[in-house]
Image (spheres, coloured by chain):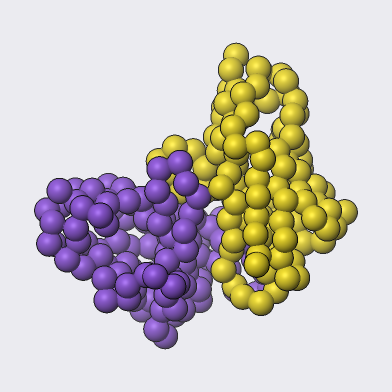
Chain colours: A purple, B yellow
Amino acid sequence: GAVVSQHPSWVICKSGTSVKIECRSLDFQATTMFWYRQFPKQSLMLMATSNEGSKATYEQGVEKDKFLINHASLTLSTLTVTSAHPEDSSFYICSARLTGGYQPQHFGDGTRLSIL
Amino acid sequence: EDQVTQSPEALRLQEGESSSLNCSYTVSGLRGLFWYRQDPGKGPEFLFTLYSAGEEKEKERLKATLTKKESFLHITAPKPEDSATYLCAVQAQAGTALIFGKGTTLSVSS
């Protein structure tokens, strides 16, 4: 149980294009989903917290106009990297948490984004 | 400031050589401490949640323990397939975001 699916797993695109990443909770409903960025040999850096039906909460230093987050249903959140540039190249990981108490977050397998 | 520190950064073991990973934390009211395993190019895989000092959890060769200041992940008789980065994270009372340590990269050779 508690499976999170993330797509695509790898994307390469040209500078200036926008890229959408999907995060789905397959066997549970998640009122809260999270988006992280991870640099090589570094730990996870929280970018934003996404709540179903409301605006995402972004961490300090994360550009909300660059990283658009939509959480339209209890099982789907999307991250769109707009007008991507090489410095946006990274490993992006989403997670979802079951409701109730202090439940663990369950993570997707990440998306490797490479901007040429 | 809430903080999580993991040690050592890297650990090399021979197959069957037991050891422990450390996670020290300072948070304003611990609500939960989480252990994850992360393989290269993958997202973290949930292992354990610990909620209060004295609590212990076990899964196969792994055992997690918790005190008021730190948590240990004990690995008994490790196998090469246990090689991975182990992440510790805490959830503090004030917010909902997890605070991650930088991880311990474990390499087990046969």
State the image quarter where residue A67 is shown: bottom left
Relative placement, left or right, of B28 versus B80 is right
Direction top: furthest residue: B110
Q: Give how far across and how far down residue A58 sits, in percent.
A: 42, 75
The residue lying furthest to the right in this view is B54
Residue A91, position as x, y percentages in the image: 36, 50
Residue at horizontal 77 percent and vertical 51 percent from the top? B70
User: Which image quadrant is residue A70 in?
Assistant: bottom left
Q: Is residue A82 above or below residue A12?
A: below
Is A20 in front, or is B71?
Answer: B71
Residue farthest toward the bottom in the current orientation of the protein = A54
Q: Can see residue B55?
A: no
B11 or A108, nearer to the observer? B11
Q: Residue at x 25, y 65 (%)?
A: A81
Q: How many marks?
A: 0
Query: How far across and how far down the image is residue A62, in percent?
Result: 37, 70
User: What residue is shown at x 40% (from left), y 57% (from top)?
Assistant: A37
Q: Is residue A84 left or right of residue A30?
A: left
Quarter of the image for the N terminus of chain A: give it: bottom right
Residue B58 shown left or right of residue A62 in the figure: right
Tell which of B61 and B10 is nearer to you: B10
Q: Is residue A98 above or below residue B74?
A: below
Compared to residue B110, the image places residue B88 above or below, namely below
Q: Kindly identify the residue that appears in the image at 59 percent across and 32 percent down.
A: B10
Query: Residue B80 placed where, x, y %?
Result: 58, 23
